[in-house]
Amino acid sequence: MKHLTVREIVLCGLFIALITAGTFIRIPVGTDVYTLQFLFTLLAGLVLGARLGAVAVAAYVLLGLLGVPVFASGGGPAYVLRPTFGYLLAFILQAWFGGYYARRGAAVSYGRLLLANLGGMVIVYLIGIAWFYLVSNYVIAAPIPLWTAILYCGILQAPPDFLLCLAAAGIGLRCYRSGVWIVEEKHTALHKEVCA
């Protein structure tokens, strides 16, 4: 396993800070409140790549579980018993997938980054809704029908999350073109060619 460069360490730290900040940036929309946490986990995957993106998000989750108040409602190991903890776990896999898919094509494009984000969104919803349903029904004794969980945790959340996917693809492409992008070794030549 190769050692991290200073640049990679700094960027990972930056994204841990951005994800934390995004958790507390609340945007009221009607009766709901949305945060920018998902935007920054998407960007972590796109900018840092599969491995480092997942590492940065996992480090954020670990900090929260160790008691650092980086989650929306604080932190600590008991957070795993919250219905929404599944989303935090899913962000790790989402960042890995986004970084992996974004770098698999012949060239980086807005469309490829958007597809990477949408695929990640599906991953987050599948894991997040399943965790929400299971914990609500079998751990904290707050029964909820599966359809209700899908409606409130998926369908109603999809429009704003789709907008974040669009925004992250645009920001990610800008980062790629400006060189703020961790390039995996096999893609270094292509990156130099596109950015030249």
Image (tube, rainbow, N blue to C red):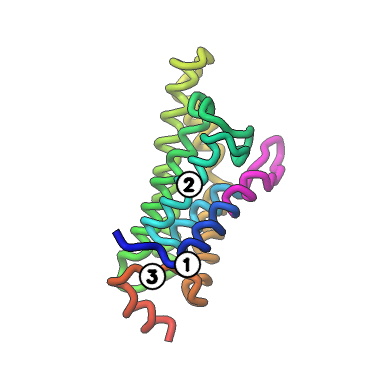
Query: What numbered label is drawn on residue 191?
Result: none
Q: Quadrant for residue 18, please give it.
A: bottom right
Local packing at callout 2 (Cα closer than 10 Å; few below 14, some 14-19, many 20+) is: some
Whether residue 82 is visible to the viewer of this picture, yes or no, is no
Mark 2 vs mark 1, foreground winner is 1
Which percent across, then down, holds residue 44? 48, 57
Which percent across, then down, holds residue 149? 49, 27
The residue closer to the viewer here, 17 or 179, is: 17
Residue contact at pointers 3 and 1, CB within 8 angstroms: no
Q: Earlier in the sequence, mark 2 or mark 1?
A: 1
Q: Which residues are magenta?
A: 18-35
The residue closer to the viewer here, 143 or 71, is: 71
Q: Earlier in the sequence, mark 3 or mark 2?
A: 2
Cα distance in 3D space between marks 2 and 1: 17 Å
Tally the marks: 3
Q: Vertically, is 39 above or below 147?
A: below
Label 3 belongs to which residue?
183
Point 54% across, 48% down: residue: 38
Label 1 belongs to which residue?
6
Whether residue 33 is visible to the viewer of this picture, yes or no, is yes
Which percent across, then down, holds residue 101? 34, 59
Point 50% across, 32% down: residue: 85
Q: Which quadrant of the rendered structure holds the N terminus?
A: bottom left
Q: Which quadrant of the rendered structure holds the C terminus?
A: bottom left
Look at the numbered disc 1 and give the secondary structure of its residue. Answer: helix
Label 2 belongs to which residue?
59
The residue closer to the viewer here, 153 or 10, is: 10
